[in-house]
């Protein structure tokens, strides 16, 4: 399994950055699934420094409003990442990530939940636009309460388009169906 460093641009330099943040986040989610399935503490322990750098980078992208600026709904990984940290014996990181996850969940419900729409917005700047990724990650991360779960699942009908769901409710979007976000939604609905 590749470590997050494969996505690092200018690795080993002071100004190194992750060129493809979504893939780093997806890699971390994959790592958590791998740990759930194989319980390979030795692998995680051997690469813990790299994984910690990736998580630190993710957490450091938390904006002043409490949301993670890269992908607001990636809170799905923070709580489970804390489980990996505790498995690796890094209780300081585990506790810090649990705290950040709680803060991000609060910010998502305060800033992205739209009572009128009965759904989570994709972005603070477009509170009337909801989408598959917001629905999927709100479900899998535990951000949504029971009432919200029912409302957002019921609202999926408005996105249904042939074999899948449109990426968003944006009126300019009549054909965009992402297999990635639909895959996350499928997992969330199971």
Image (cartoon, rainbow, N blue to C red):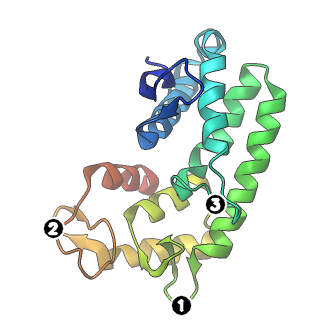
Callout 2 secondary element: loop
Instruction: State left or right for residue 153 relative to residue 116.
Output: left
Q: Mark 3 falls on what kind of element?
A: loop
Is residue 145 visible in this depiction of the protein? no
Of 148 and 119, the residue lying toward us = 119
Residue, disc 1: 116
User: Looking at the image, is mark 3 or mark 1 nearer the viewer?
Assistant: 3
In the rendered image, residue 50, in percent from the top left (x then y), is placed at 60, 20
Residue 158 appears left or right of 119: left
Residue 121 in view, yes or no: yes
SS category of the residue bearing label 1: loop
Residue 87, quarter of picture:
top right
Q: Which residue is mark 3?
A: 67
Residue shown at 42% from the left, 37% from the top: 19
Q: Which residue is mark 2?
A: 162
- Quadrant containing the N terminus in the rendered view: top left
Work out whether residue 131 or residue 10 is closer to the camera in this orientation and state it.
Answer: 10
Mark 2 → mark 1, Cα distance in angstroms: 27 Å
Toward the viewer: 131 or 64? Answer: 64
Q: Quadrant of residue 104?
A: bottom right
* Extreme residue in the front direction: 14
150, above or below 26, in the image = below
Q: Is tag 3's residue or tag 2's residue first in the polypeptide sequence? A: 3
Q: Is residue 167 left or right of residue 90?
A: left
Q: Could you tell me residue 188's position as x and y percent? A: 45, 54
Q: Residues within 10 Å of mark 1 (few under 14, many from 20)?
A: few
């Amino acid at each position: 399994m590749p470590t997050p460093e494969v996505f690092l641009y200018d690795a080993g330099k002071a100004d190194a950055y992750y060129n493809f943040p979504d893939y780093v986040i997806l890699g971390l989610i994959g790592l958590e699934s791998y740990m759930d399935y194989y319980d390979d503490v030795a692998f995680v322990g051997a690469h813990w420094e790299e994984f910690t750098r990736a998580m630190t980078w993710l957490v450091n992208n938390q904006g002043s409003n409490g949301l993670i600026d890269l992908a607001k709904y990636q809170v799905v990984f923070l709580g489970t990442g804390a489980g990996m940290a505790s498995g690796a014996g890094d209780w300081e990181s585990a506790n810090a990530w649990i705290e950040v996850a709680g803060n991000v969940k609060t910010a998502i419900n305060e800033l992205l939940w739209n009572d009128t729409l009965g759904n989570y917005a994709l972005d603070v700047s477009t509170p009337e636009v909801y989408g598959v990724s917001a629905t999927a990650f709100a479900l899998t991360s535990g951000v949504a309460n029971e009432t919200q779960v029912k409302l957002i699942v019921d609202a999926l009908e408005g996105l249904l388009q042939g074999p899948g769901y449109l990426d968003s409710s944006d009126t300019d979007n009549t054909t965009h169906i992402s297999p990635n976000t639909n895959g996350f939604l499928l997992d969330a609905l199971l």
